Image: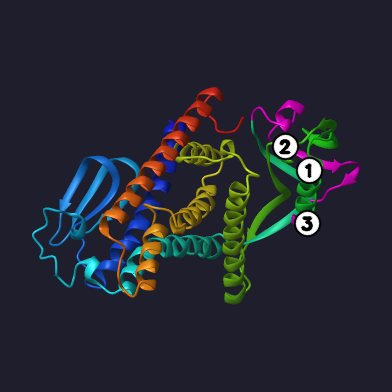
């Protein structure tokens, strides 16, 4: 029963972030008087439907996303093509606001969660401990072959001591990258005992683990409003930097597809966290919300960034958009690629869950 509730909570977090994103698009359009024909959460068969005065609201069976539909995209719409309240007939700036509003909504929502946590739970404080923690070890990697396990703490590398700081975390990463293909001697704390291991980073200078500073966190009431917002700003900035760093590693080839999770993996990991610490759901919601914003703003077809790229081209061309057939072909190609990637991640995560007995952590 606890596991089912945890999964439902995880799905609820993902669904809430989708609603926030689509609500951003919807409100940005309606507040400007732009016609919206449909607001859908999910894809596939319709579960619930409500026809409002101007917009149809839909809850669909597959909660893997959502969309805001405009009459512009409906060939059976009876609204005249030259109606000034159609999205396509609005100035470029109006359309850009609607398209980017989902990303802005996710970022605002993430900051609001962090601020709420600071208000009601207190501002975070950190207690650093020796070593760099390993919360996750990926299978079939240098770390797993060497015998490292989740919750191990690396105390030394090549006889150099490590503290639980960002500086030492970066130092450890640089040592690992600089010793690609070469054995490294490390001391690991496991269950209050110290053990020595030898591991050899792969050709890309990776060992296949998640590394974090070895710290304990607690919260205390803020001294004043200034500290409250300062702590919220710092927390939000760190989450944004983490997201940028993750995508940098992925695009540079320093992170592989095995380290990327799709919807199934996100729900599974969130459910596992919910079982042990329900409050961690708020932190997960912040991280996923920022990731959704970053992914959607990428200039790729079928994403918000792709639509903004078309608007930029239109602006450069003096208000003349690219021909519809070109835009449709680009968007259709992008949609096929994104759906293919989503299915790949779903299958990968499903096999990982089966292999690891229902956990995303080996």
Task: Using the numbered discs, state the Cα–Cα distance from disc 2 to disc 3 in whole angstroms.
Answer: 19 Å
Does dot 3 land on a helix, a strand or a loop? helix
Does dot 2 land on a helix, a strand or a loop? loop
Q: Are marks 2 and 3 in contact (CB under 8 Å)?
A: no
- Asked whether, in this view, residue 260 is left or right of residue 329, the answer is right
Task: Using the numbered discs, state the Cα–Cα distance from disc 1 to disc 3 in whole angstroms.
Answer: 14 Å
Q: Which numbered disc flags the more N-terminal residue, 1 or 2? A: 1
Does dot 1 land on a helix, a strand or a loop? helix
Residue 181: x and y in percent read: 79, 35
Q: Which numbered disc flags the more N-terminal residue, 2 or 3? A: 3
Q: Which residue is mark 1?
A: 176
Q: Which residue is mark 3?
A: 167
In the picture, the quarter occupied by the C terminus is: top right
Task: Using the numbered discs, state the Cα–Cα distance from disc 1 to disc 2 in whole angstroms.
Answer: 8 Å
- The extreme right residue here reads 159
Q: Which residues are magenta?
A: 139-166
Q: Which residue is mark 2?
A: 207
Vertical side of 123 occupied by 174: above or below: above
- Which marked residue is nearer to the observer: mark 1 or mark 3? 1
Badge number at residue 106:
none
């Amino acid at each position: 029963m606890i596991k089912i509730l945890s999964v439902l909570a995880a799905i609820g977090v993902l669904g809430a972030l989708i609603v926030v994103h689509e609500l951003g698009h919807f409100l940005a359009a309606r507040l400007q008087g732009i016609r919206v024909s449909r607001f859908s959460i999910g894809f596939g068969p319709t579960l619930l439907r409500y026809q409002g005065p101007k917009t149809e609201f839909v809850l669909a069976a597959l909660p893997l996303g959502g969309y805001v539909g405009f009459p512009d995209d409906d060939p059976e719409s009876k609204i005249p093509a030259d109606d000034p309240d159609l999205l396509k007939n609005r100035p470029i700036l109006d359309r850009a606001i609607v398209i980017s509003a989902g990303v802005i909504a996710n970022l605002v929502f993430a900051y609001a969660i962090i601020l709420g946590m600071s208000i009601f739970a207190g501002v975070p404080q950190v207690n650093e401990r020796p070593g760099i923690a390993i919360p996750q070890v990926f299978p079939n990697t240098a770390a797993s072959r060497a015998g490292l396990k989740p919750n191990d703490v690396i105390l030394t590398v090549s006889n150099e001591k490590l503290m639980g700081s960002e500086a030492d975390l970066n130092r450890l990463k640089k040592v690992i990258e600089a010793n690609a293909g070469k054995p490294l001697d490390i001391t690991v704390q496991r269950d209050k005992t110290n053990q020595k291991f030898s591991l050899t980073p792969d050709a890309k200078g990776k060992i296949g683990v998640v590394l974090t500073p070895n710290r304990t966190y607690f919260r205390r009431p803020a001294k004043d409003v200034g500290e409250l917002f300062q702590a919220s700003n710092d927390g939000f900035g760190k989450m944004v930097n983490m997201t940028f760093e993750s995508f940098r590693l992925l695009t540079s080839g320093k992170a592989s597809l095995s380290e990327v999770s799709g919807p199934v993996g996100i729900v599974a990991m969130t459910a596992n966290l919910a079982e042990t610490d329900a409050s961690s759901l708020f932190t997960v919601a912040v991280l996923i919300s920022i990731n959704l914003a970053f992914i959607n703003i990428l200039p790729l077809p079928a994403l918000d960034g792709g639509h903004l790229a078309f608007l930029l081209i239109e602006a450069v061309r003096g208000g003349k958009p690219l021909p519809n057939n070109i835009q449709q072909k680009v968007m259709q190609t992008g949609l096929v690629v994104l759906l293919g990637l989503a299915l790949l991640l779903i299958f990968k995560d499903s096999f990982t869950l089966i292999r690891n007995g229902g956990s995303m952590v080996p």
